[in-house]
Amino acid sequence: MLRRVALWLVIMMLTISVSAVWAATPGVVDVNALNLRSGPGHGYKIISTMSRSTPLVIMSESGEWKQVMASSGLIGWVFGQYIVADQSFQAGNHNVVVRASRLNVRQGPGTTYPVVTTLVQDQLTQVTGKIGEWFQVRVSGKTGFIHQEWVTPVTEENPVQGSVSVPLARVLVSVLNMRGGKGTEFPVVTKLNLGMLVAVLEEGTWSKIMLENGVIGYVLSEYVENVGGQALARISANMVNERSGPDTTFSILATHPAGKTLAFSGWDGSWVKVSSTSGTGYILGNLLSFAFTTAPIDFTLPPAIGIQGFVVAVDAGHGGPDPGAIGVNGLREKNINFTMALKLRALLVAAGAEVVMTRVGDYTLSIDERIGIAHNAGADLFVSIHNNAHPSSAVSGTQTFYGVTLGSFNLGHQVHRRLVGLGMEDKGLLNANFGVLVRTKIPAILTETGFLSNPDDAALLAQETFINHAVQAHFEGIHEWLATKR
């Protein structure tokens, strides 16, 4: 939330230009004291000093300099000859399947590293190495780390690739009523949240859907969209018979151990139709649990084409002693802003853009420092990420403010209409005289995704799924605007 210029204190100026998305190679410091700098050169400011054998993750290179991330999440540059490969790292090449309902993929081998994406239960993942209790994995062509405790090595019994399941869909609005029948006159069975995955059993104006807990109901089809992935049925008892038809009188095709996973292909009375690479069969539904898997969840990495050559300045509002707004649920705005900025950076870089971050840690900057970072980097646009607050907790919705420079309105329009499309109340696309908007020489916008003072908005901002959709809306708007500049 941008309220007063005085809230931003002058502490330091850091810049970062990212050329790779969560690439992650383990390394260690090989000198008694190594300076971590804000850029690839001795002329850049020292952020921190690391001692010998300090573990870190190598993210990218620029000449003799390497961009690294410390376990605290602090990012900077070091002279390359003073870090070496971590000898405890063991290369490998095998697959694992996720056992947890959600499993964080982190930038480095430890829980202090930031989360870069999330895997879901039964998702198949390639392991490329191991360090301690952490597996290095490849996800959508990118590298990160997961803890070994939550995965199982794949055997021939694990994969369900090539099997046919019912289609999956994702909820497109903040709250969606699932009803007991095809119409608003039917009672609400439960409420679904933005981004939730459902299995589609029947399509039409009203779609018949199933949740992961097996509950079945109906939703208006216009509020969900189909996504790639699989609906899975997992055997929850030992020695379960799969039959050729939906009754115990049909022949037994196979007998499965507990934990075996098959594709969920629909219901036939109390029996579930399942599918594997060997064919289809039927299993009693009360002997199964369900899981929905899709590509690395929560936000979509775009193809690395379309906006190469553009430089985008991403500004995470507030920081350090300035927390910004404090949510009714205790969330601090500065932390949400920074999380969104990091995710937006990843999407933009994946699409080919160069990104400069105004801050890469928990500290504050003056308005002039934020603007100066963007101008010095030759940025083509400036986006400042904030979240809102109001004296009345009843006020909710999303706002976007645009600057005075040519192109700011159109940029704001592209982003704002997508934020509203998430189901947020439209609080307007407005011109404002905020310092970061009126003192920039490039198109500039400031977004306020939601009101932390409103219980419903604050609850959404606490959900990583919603955050990722909001970041995706920012990215798509920026991408659309940049595409017109070719």
Image (cartoon, rainbow, N blue to C red):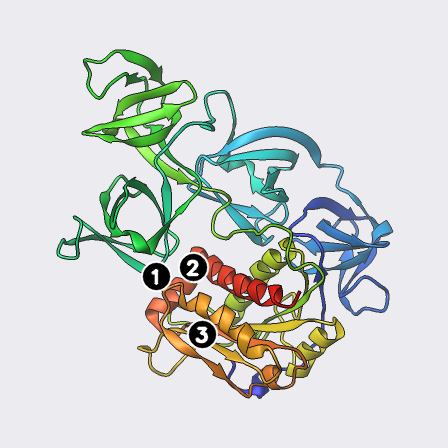
Residue 166, percent from left and from top = 34, 35
Report helix, strand or loop for mark 1.
Answer: loop
- For label 1, count other residues whose C-alpha is less than 10 Å away and answer few (under 14), some (14-19) or many (20+): many
Q: Earlier in the sequence, mark 2 or mark 1?
A: 1
Report helix, strand or loop for mark 3.
Answer: loop
- For label 2, count other residues whose C-alpha is less than 10 Å away and answer few (under 14), some (14-19) or many (20+): many
Residue named by callout 2: 466
Q: Amino acid at mark 2?
A: Phe
- Asked if the residues shown at circle 2 and circle 1 are in contact, with their CB atoms under 8 angstroms apart, the answer is yes
Residue named by callout 1: 174
Report helix, strand or loop for mark 2.
Answer: helix
Above/below status of 193 relative to 291 = below
Residue named by callout 3: 326
Q: Earlier in the sequence, mark 3 or mark 1?
A: 1
Above/below status of 34 relative to 458 = above
Q: Amino acid at mark 3?
A: Ile
Left or right, 360 with reference to 337: right
Q: Quadrant of residue 341?
A: bottom right
Left or right, 194 with reference to 220: right
Q: Quadrant of the C terminus?
A: bottom right
Q: CA distance from mark 2 to mark 3?
A: 18 Å
Q: Is residue 94 visible?
A: yes
Residue 84, percent from left and from top = 81, 45
What residue lies at 68% left-to-right and 46% top-to-bottom? 24
Q: Is residue 323 visible?
A: no
